[in-house]
């Protein structure tokens, strides 16, 4: 018979969605209901690191430490650091392309379509990782097949914009429309690093207004 004075601590079940803590690392492990959110956390942390540091300087350990997740927890979601980088870039670009494609197909008014595309793009830049910048900075680290696939997705996304801008700017040649669109992309993407302490809505309003006018103005003002 056990000693009645020795109390056994009751087993505590983590709350819904909480993970189990690794007794060696002290980091939280995944439960099935939490895996989606943990995957998103890993992607966010990795995106910030890939933006701030060269790819070769970022380690799995750095990602895990900032996310508060052990390496085994990371490897449940991503095979390695390279797979993590690919997901950081590919997922948001896919969302941008899908949104633009849907708007271009369903919106009859090109002005309304362009407004929606600009707003969605700048909000994605301000509220999420600056995906195009991360890709351009780390393009050398992508396997050739993945690099080509992502490049194609970015080009298809740009084509959705070009198809709308072409309607609004009949005065421009196709090469000019493409140049203008890519220039506006560069301007919008720069908001990720040039926000100057402004709140998100101010950035969105300022940048979207500038982008819309740049894409739709038919001529330069006379001096």
Image (tube, helix red, strand yellow):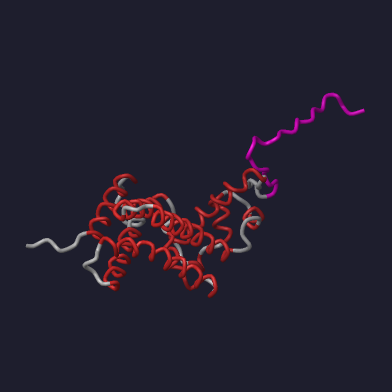
Horizontal side of 20 relative to 50 (left or right) equals: right
- Range shown magenta: 1-24
Quarter occupied by residue 163: bottom left
Q: Position of residue 65 (x, y in %)?
A: 56, 53
Q: Which residue is drawn at the image coordinates 65% and 47% (left, top)?
A: 30
Most distant residue in the front direction: 108
In the rendered view of the protein, which quadrant contains the C terminus?
bottom left
Q: Which residue is drawn at the image coordinates 58% and 54% (left, top)?
A: 64
- In front here: 96 or 15? 96
Q: Position of residue 102 (x, y in %)?
A: 43, 55
Most distant residue in the left direction: 223
Q: Position of residue 36 (x, y in %)?
A: 59, 48
Most distant residue in the top direction: 4
Q: Is residue 103 above or below residue 143?
A: above
- In front here: 82 or 12? 82
In the rendered view of the protein, which quadrant contains the N terminus?
top right
- In front here: 213 or 34? 213
Most distant residue in the right direction: 1
Q: Is residue 114 above or below residue 34?
A: below
Horizontal side of 154 relative to 35 (left or right) equals: left
Q: Is residue 45 magenta?
A: no
Q: Is residue 12 magenta?
A: yes
**Secondary structure predominantly adopted by residues drawn in magenta:** loop
């Amino acid at each position: 018979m056990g000693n009645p004075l020795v109390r056994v601590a009751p087993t505590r079940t983590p709350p819904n969605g909480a993970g189990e803590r690794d007794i060696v690392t002290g980091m939280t492990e995944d439960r099935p209901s939490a895996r989606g959110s943990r995957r998103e956390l890993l992607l966010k942390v990795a995106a910030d690191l890939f933006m701030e540091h060269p790819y070769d300087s970022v380690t799995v350990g750095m990602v895990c430490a900032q996310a508060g997740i052990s390496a085994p927890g990371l490897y449940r979601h991503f095979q390695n650091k390279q797979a993590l980088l690919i997901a950081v870039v590919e997922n948001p670009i896919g969302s941008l392309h899908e949104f633009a494609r849907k708007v271009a197909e369903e919106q009859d008014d090109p002005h309304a379509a362009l407004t929606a595309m600009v707003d969605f793009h700048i909000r994605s830049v301000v509220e999420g990782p600056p995906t195009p910048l991360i890709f351009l900075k780390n393009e050398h680290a992508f396997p050739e097949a993945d690099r080509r696939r992502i490049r194609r997705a970015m080009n298809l996304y740009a084509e959705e914009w070009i198809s709308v801008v072409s309607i609004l700017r009949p005065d421009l040649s196709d090469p000019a429309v493409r140049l203008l669109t890519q220039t506006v992309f560069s301007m919008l993407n720069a908001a990720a690093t040039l926000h100057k302490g402004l709140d998100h809505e101010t950035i969105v309003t300022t940048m979207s207004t500038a982008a819309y006018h740049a894409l739709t103005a038919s001529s330069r003002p006379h001096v």
